[in-house]
Structures are given as structure tokens and as C-alpha cells.
Image (spheres, helix red, strand yellow):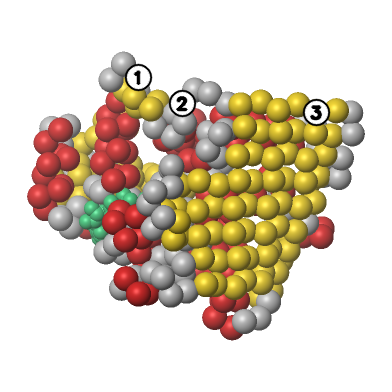
């Protein structure tokens, strides 16, 4: 089979990495780079002898590509994703699906009604540590999940120094807590039904970023399952890691807890328990000149789904409930009321 020809749309931090990882896989090659910043598009394209564009519609018209990887800012996913689906290209898109629920539903519907493969890059599912938690739950080792808790934070460098031009258009709930929201929805295996959330605000606003400093959200799922999410964006830059967190899943017969920084997990159930500390590659680790880890594994799942013509584990249709929860969190913050999620 010939290689899957990939175009990258949005060649910033993530998109430039996708360009490299796709090019490093034997099944794919990076042939075009699109970025509204022409210099950036040309610089990344030159690394792979690819064509540079500043307009994704022009690229879709002129290039013979099989798939696109969309890594534009959180609030700018809709237009390139819909254009690519309409042009019958497979789509690997960054999380969150969108920051407006109407756009997320539109993408889920367009993908479900198309013949192409569309996958949302919830890459943390491919971290050994989080996949191990899922395996324990599926094996019934903590019984039925009934409660969950996620604490997730970035240092203030993320909104003020890493993505300052678009931090005001997103939120810690859409940016980094996207992953924990996805993981918890995946672990509990049922849909959200009601959300109550509060924000704290002021520190980022004083620096010109119109975003929450932090959010506390409580999500009620079907069957009485309950989960809370603490998400903040103002940890000091002196913190030992740019992003960190803690998660706990409590089941009817046991509990699992996991600490991001130490990578230590504890599992205890009615028969006993143990703890373990994960080692090995995390998100993106360079070994012998190639990037390995969760990013590569997530992207390889996309390529395998194209080749085997199957729906990805994180297709927009499957992960739409996480977008519904995110939208309900924002709505609850605005209205100071609990928000019901309709099916
Ligand atoms: N899966 C993960 O673990 C993970 C991690 C970090 C970020 N992300 C996501 O990746 C996306 C990109 O994040 P980033 O950190 O690379 O941001 P970034 O700001 O570094 O890059 C975004 C790029 O998109 C370009 N762009 C904007 N509008 C465009 C358009 N219409 N057409 C073409 N290019 C356009 C910008 O010029 C910029 O180069 C975000 O949605 C973010 O949440 C995912």
C-alpha cells in the first residue's frame, strides 16, 4: 500500500510535532504544511520537502493528500475540519473538538455521516499509566466505578507565555483538563447528565488574559456516578513541572489513585492491593532519532484505523459527551445554576 499523504494545518507547537511524527512512520509522509504564519509554514515544510501554504482551502484544492492533521488553536478547529471532511480527507484533529458546543456537534455529525476516518487526539489515553487504569477497571478490579476526582493544573506560563495570543479564547477546561475529562468519561463508561461549576477569576485578567484562573466542576453521570474536576492555570512558574495533577477513581469494590509527577499508582480492593511506579516513555520521548510515546501511539491508531477502515476509539461521535460536559461547565459558571445535559 502506498504511504498515507498527510497535510498539517496549524504548524505551531503541536502541529510541527505531528509533521515530524507522521513523517517518521513507515505508513505515512508529510507532504504539505499550512499555517497563517507564512514563515512558520515554510520553515516546517522545508524539513520534509513539503509544500507550504497559508490557506487550508488552497492546500485542499491543490494538493493530492489523503489526510490532514488539524492543530490550530482550540477555538479554530471547526473550519479546517469541516473543509477537510467535505473534501473527503481523513482528519486527525487536536482536542478539544471545539470550544462551542454547536461546532462540536456539527463536527461529530459531519464525521459520522462521512466515509472518512476522523479522530480526536486524546493522546493521554495512550500513556501506559492511564491505559493501565482503564485495564484495571475493565478487568473489574475495583468493581463498578462510582466516584472520580481529578486535579489538574498548568503553571501560569501556559496562558501567559505559551499560548498568550489565544488563551482568552479557551479555558483550562478546554485546554489541559480536556484530557482528564476525557479519561474520566472513558473510565466510568456512562454519559454525563448534570453539571455544576464555579470559577475563580482575576489573576489572569490582571495580565490581560480573559480566562478563568481556575474552575471547580461537579459532573453527575448516568447511574448515580459522580466526578469532580479541579482545573487551574495560575500555579507559579517555580513549580517543578509545567503541568501536573492527581486522579482518583473509586469503585464499588476498590479504588485507584494516580499522581502525575511521581507516576505512582495505588490500587486497593476488597482482596488487597499494591502500588507501582511507572517508568518509560511518556508523551513524546526521543529515542534513536525518533519520537516515541503516547503521541506516536495515538497517531498510529489513526493510521491503523485508516488502513483497516474502522472507527477510531476517540472519534468525534464517541467523545462528544466530553464536549457536552465542557459546554455545560461553561454554562453553569455563567448562570450559577446546575445544567442538565440532554441526550
Ligand atoms: N493532544 C495534546 O496532548 C495536546 C497538547 C497541547 C496542545 N494541544 C492542542 O493542539 C492545538 C494547537 O496547540 P499549540 O500549542 O500547537 O498552539 P500554537 O499556538 O503553538 O499553534 C497553533 C498554530 O495554528 C496556526 N493557525 C491559526 N489559525 C490557523 C488557520 N486558520 N490555518 C492554519 N494555521 C492556523 C497558528 O499560526 C499557529 O502556528 C490546540 O487545540 C491545543 O489544545 C493538544
Q: Which residue is mark 1?
A: 287
Camera-side residue of 80 and 268? 268
Ligand 1 is within 8 Å of the C-beta of the residue at disc 2: no
- Judge the density around disc 3: few (<14), some (14-19), many (≥20) Cα neighbours within 10 Å: few
Against 194, residue 43 (above or below) is: above
Against 157, residue 220 (above or below) is: below
Of the two numbered discs 3 and 1 in the rendering, the one whose residue sits closer to the viewer: 3
Image point 75% across, 59% down: which residue?
Answer: 226
Check disc 1 and report its element: helix, strand or loop. strand
Q: Judge left or right: residue 245 versus residue 13.
A: right
Rounded to the nearest angstrom, the CA distance separating label 3 from label 1 is: 34 Å
Against 165, residue 91 (above or below) is: above
- Judge the density around disc 2: few (<14), some (14-19), many (≥20) Cα neighbours within 10 Å: some
List x then y, in percent, for residue 108: 50, 58
| Placement of the C terminus among the 4 image quadrants | bottom right
User: What's the mark number on residue 281?
Assistant: 2
Check disc 3 and report its element: helix, strand or loop. strand
List x then y, in percent, for residue 123: 48, 40
Residue 327 visible in this rendered orientation of the protein? yes
User: What's the mark number on residue 273?
Assistant: 3
Image point 54% across, 59% down: which residue?
Answer: 231
- Judge the density around disc 1: few (<14), some (14-19), many (≥20) Cα neighbours within 10 Å: few
List x then y, in percent, for residue 251: 81, 44
Choose top left, top right, bottom left or bottom right for residue 204: bottom left
Image point 30% across, 38% down: which residue?
Answer: 17
Image point 57% across, 33% down: which residue?
Answer: 263
Amino acid at each position: 500500500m502506498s504511504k498515507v499523504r498527510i497535510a498539517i494545518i496549524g504548524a505551531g507547537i503541536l502541529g510541527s510535532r505531528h509533521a515530524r511524527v507522521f513523517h517518521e512512520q513507515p505508513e505515512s509522509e508529510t507532504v504539505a504544511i499550512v499555517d497563517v504564519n507564512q514563515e512558520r509554514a515554510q520553515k516546517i515544510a522545508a524539513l520534509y520537502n513539503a509544500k507550504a501554504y497559508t490557506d487550508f482551502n488552497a492546500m485542499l484544492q491543490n494538493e493530492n493528500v489523503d489526510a490532514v492533521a488539524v492543530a490550530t488553536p482550540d477555538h479554530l478547529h471547526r473550519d479546517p475540519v469541516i473543509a477537510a471532511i467535505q473534501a473527503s480527507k481523513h482528519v486527525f484533529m487536536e482536542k478539544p473538538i471545539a470550544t462551542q458546543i454547536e461546532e462540536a456537534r456539527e463536527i461529530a455529525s459531519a464525521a459520522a455521516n462521512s466515509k472518512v476516518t476522523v479522530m480526536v487526539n486524546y493522546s493521554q489515553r495512550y500513556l501506559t499509566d492511564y491505559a493501565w487504569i482503564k485495564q484495571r477497571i475493565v478487568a473489574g478490579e475495583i468493581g463498578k466505578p462510582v466516584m472520580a476526582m481529578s486535579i489538574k493544573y498548568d503553571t501560569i506560563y501556559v496562558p501567559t507565555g505559551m499560548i498568550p495570543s489565544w488563551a482568552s479564547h479557551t479555558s483550562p477546561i478546554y485546554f489541559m483538563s480536556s484530557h482528564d475529562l476525557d479519561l474520566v468519561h472513558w473510565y466510568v463508561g456512562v454519559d454525563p447528565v448534570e453539571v455544576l461549576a464555579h470559577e475563580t477569576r482575576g489573576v489572569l485578567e490582571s495580565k490581560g488574559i480573559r480566562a478563568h484562573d481556575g474552575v471547580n466542576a461537579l459532573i453527575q453521570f448516568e447511574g448515580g456516578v459522580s466526578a469532580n474536576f479541579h482545573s487551574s492555570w495560575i500555579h507559579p512558574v517555580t513549580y517543578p513541572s509545567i503541568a501536573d495533577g492527581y486522579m482518583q477513581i473509586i469503585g464499588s469494590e476498590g479504588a485507584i489513585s494516580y499522581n502525575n509527577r511521581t507516576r505512582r499508582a495505588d490500587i486497593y480492593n476488597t482482596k488487597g492491593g499494591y502500588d507501582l511506579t511507572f517508568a518509560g516513555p511518556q508523551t513524546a520521548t526521543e529515542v534513536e532519532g525518533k519520537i516515541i510515546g503516547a503521541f506516536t501511539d495515538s497517531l498510529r491508531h489513526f493510521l491503523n484505523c485508516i488502513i483497516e477502515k474502522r472507527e477510531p476509539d476517540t472519534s468525534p461521535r464517541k467523545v462528544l459527551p466530553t464536549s457536552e460536559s465542557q459546554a455545560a461547565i461553561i454554562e453553569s459558571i455563567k448562570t450559577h445554576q446546575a445544567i442538565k445535559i440532554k441526550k
